[in-house]
Image (spheres, rainbow, N blue to C red):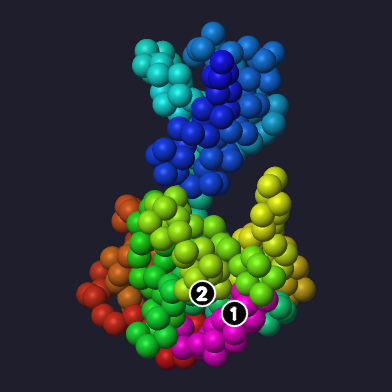
Amino acid sequence: MTEPPKLLDRVRAAVRARHYSGRTEEAYVAWIRRYIIVHGKRHPSAMGAEEVNAFLSALATERKVGAATQNQALSALIFLYRAVLQDPLPWLEDLVRAQRPARLPVVLTVDEVRQVIERMDGVSPLLAQLFYGAGLRLIEALMLRVKDIDFERGQIVVRDPKWKRDRVTMLPRTITEGMHEQLTEARLIHEHDLAEGFGTVWLPDAIAVKLPSASRDWRWQWIFPATRRWTDVKGGQGRHHLHETVVQRAVTRAANEAQVDKRATCHTFRHSFATHLLERGHDIRTVQELLGHRDGSTTMIYTHVLQHGARGVRSPLDPS
């Protein structure tokens, strides 16, 4: 007799059925596991609003987590009860979401951007130029595939893993040569993997079924591949994209060396991208589309005054 799937396996299946990202799956499973352990490994179906609130309160008072982290944990538990346990949550109204403080983003000056990038090496400066020159998030840049770059039109198609909506942004002319060089390096890695009998890359579920040979197709390969192949439990190997921490550490190190008196992160370049475009006179709606914001109020945090009409946009990385 086949045993029923374990709770966390049911969570993973429910997440994948809704085509959530792998990062969301990882986060939800981690929070649900922690919730169960904190309450003495009791089954969630035997718990409710009291236990959820106690768990969230402990995160805030004992672990000192931020509002965003606390709300992510709550979202994971709501998903558990609604999508997995089929609980209608009559006690949901008793739950309190933490209020995220309204904070202005950290923005670097043009000179600070230049100083930080100049102190980076390897593939990291090219990625930083994509954050600042095209407004990409860290994971968006790392998940770029060969087919997403259009050199002729000077644009990048961003497969947005956050909102599942693709968008188009500019490919700065300044980094065209660097992107060509990176593609050459990535192709050498891919051809070496193929020669050794590997060369596969992760594909979205629908694509993997529809185009099973695409995982080895050059067009679907990562532009920024990891330095090592991964190995699964069956011995199969493939190559993922470069890990986020490689770039995050490079930015932190370069900002310290440049003696920038601000907390500079990968996302700071994206904030600077938006702010510098607005300073150049580009309208708020265009910047919203380039950033991929669903709500214009999110973009409005960068300015409260601009009322310019639409015009052609040039990357802030390129000279005027």
Horizontal side of residue 181 vs 298, given as left or right? right
Question: Of the numbered discs in the image, which one, if any, rests on residue 187?
Answer: 1
The answer to whether the residues at label 2 and label 1 have Cβ atoms under 8 Å apart is: yes
Question: The residue under label 2 is which amino acid type?
Answer: Trp
Q: Is residue 161 visible?
A: no
Which label belongs to residue 221? none
Left or right: residue 298 compared with residue 141: left
Of residues 104 and 190, the one nearer the viewer is 190
Q: Position of residue 314 (x, y in %)?
A: 38, 83
Q: Main secondary structure of the magenta part?
A: helix
Q: Residues within 10 Å of mark 2 (few under 14, many from 20)?
A: some
Q: Does 154 appear above or below 143?
A: below
Residue 214, magenta (yes or no): no
Foreground of the two, 294 or 179: 179
Vertical arrangement, residue 162 with respect to residue 72, above or below: below
Magenta stretch bounds: 172-192
Q: At x 63% / y 12%, what residue is drawn?
A: 42
Left or right: 247 with respect to 89? Answer: right
Question: Local crowd at mark 1 within 10 Å, few (<14), some, or many (≥20)?
Answer: some
Residue 157 in view in this figure: yes
Viewer-proximal residue among 98 and 162: 162
Tell me residue 123's x, y (percent).
66, 76
List x then y, in percent, for residue 55. 61, 21
Disc on the earlier residue, 2 or 1: 1
Q: The disc labelled 1 sits on which kind of residue?
A: Arg
Residue sitting at x 65%, y 26%: 34
Q: Which mark is residue 218?
A: 2
